[in-house]
Amino acid sequence: MKVIYDEVQKRHHPGFFLTSGARAPNPETPARADMLFAAATKAGLIHEVPPDLGLAPAASVHTPEYLAFLATIYTRWQRIELASEEVIPNIHPDRRDGAYPLSAVGQAGYHMADTSCPIGADTYECALRSAHAAAQAARLVSAGDPAAYALCRPPGHHAFADLAGGFCYLNNAAIAAQALRATADRVTILDVDLHHGNGTQGIFYARPDVLTVSIHADPARFYPFFWGHADERGRDAGLGYNLNLPLERKTGDEGFLAALDRALERIAAFAPGALVVALGLDAYEGDPFAGLAVTTPGFGRIGARIAQLALPTVIVQEGGYACEALGANLVSFLDGFRAGHRVGVALGGERP
Ligand SMILES: [Zn+2]
């Protein structure tokens, strides 16, 4: 299996965000990428730098005005007298069907959901390279690799078609799924991050060709608050093609695996031709966000069960924050996944 990653992705280095109104260091640090890359290498994955795929991967799921905003906002922000170094919004529309503002401040509020997705000088380029990693992993899997790991940083699953949020700018998992649609009629995104994959859900909410499934801490009392509830099932042609499995705070391995079994049942019934795993490692019991309580061996069991679907699989890195076991959790998932994938294939799971 390959790990797709470009060191350039480390240049994005957000300074702070607001948590309960207080200024705190932004936990989505470049050091995460070092820890995850070292772990992927330790697990025996082969490194590939993604080619420059231009704007096409991002444009496959994001709106043109949002991409133009990401490309230009940092420079425009610097022209505002006494503005902050990083672009951080301070006003938001209460609905999204009104006029589109011309001002940098207005557009920042329109395209940024919260304060945890600041835009610095290198953010746009890093987000594009992160998207290239996802798109390249999908290309490899479409071409016959059984699986590939995209070390996407910054992460992506909170990014909607026209909205950044929660450390995310471009939705890497959605980009991978859209790329896989070139060779698969139906694709599933299974999101196991601690937080609900609200951006991913939003992008595919009205579509029946991409089933979105997310297991996460109950948003009634956890980010992203406004999405991720069990009654969100999709709309229009996409009704029934979104499954949310919220878990109580501090749920451990057994509770998580029980939800995963429900997810896998739904995925099997959908019979997709390919799978994207939105792999957050922040459901870990020792993660700084402390929402769920999955153990390091638990990630291996999660990987093994997912792999038994025996589907061509793109693993896209989402959250998981600096803590002692971050690398070990990735190794555990990858080892479990590869062992399970061999079993799944041997059992005659569907392969293209
Ligand atoms: Zn997360």
Image: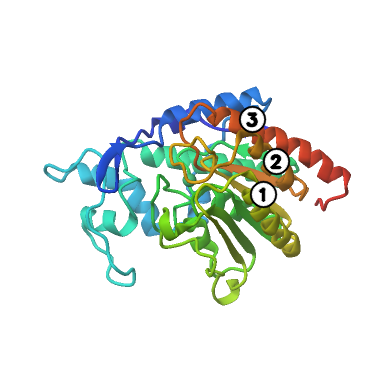
Q: Tell me residue 253's x, y (percent).
A: 63, 44
Q: Which residue is pictured at 70% across the width and 53% down the height?
A: 274
Residue to which mark 2 is pinned: 301
Q: CA distance from mark 2 to mark 3?
A: 12 Å
Q: Looking at the image, can residue 13 be seen?
A: yes
Q: Tell me residue 295's x, y (percent).
A: 60, 37
Residue to which mark 3 is pinned: 331
Q: Which residue is pictured at 25% across the width and 43% down the height?
A: 22
Relative vertical location of residue 22 with respect to residue 49 in this rendering, above or below? below
Disc 2 or 1, which lies upstream in sequence?
1
Q: Are marks 2 and 1 in contact (CB under 8 Å)?
A: yes
Dot 3 amino acid type: Val
- How is the structure coloured here? rainbow
Decide which of 298, 15 is in the foreground and name it: 298
| Numbered disc in front, either 3 or 1 | 1
Relative vertical location of residue 276 with respect to residue 212 in this rendering, above or below? above
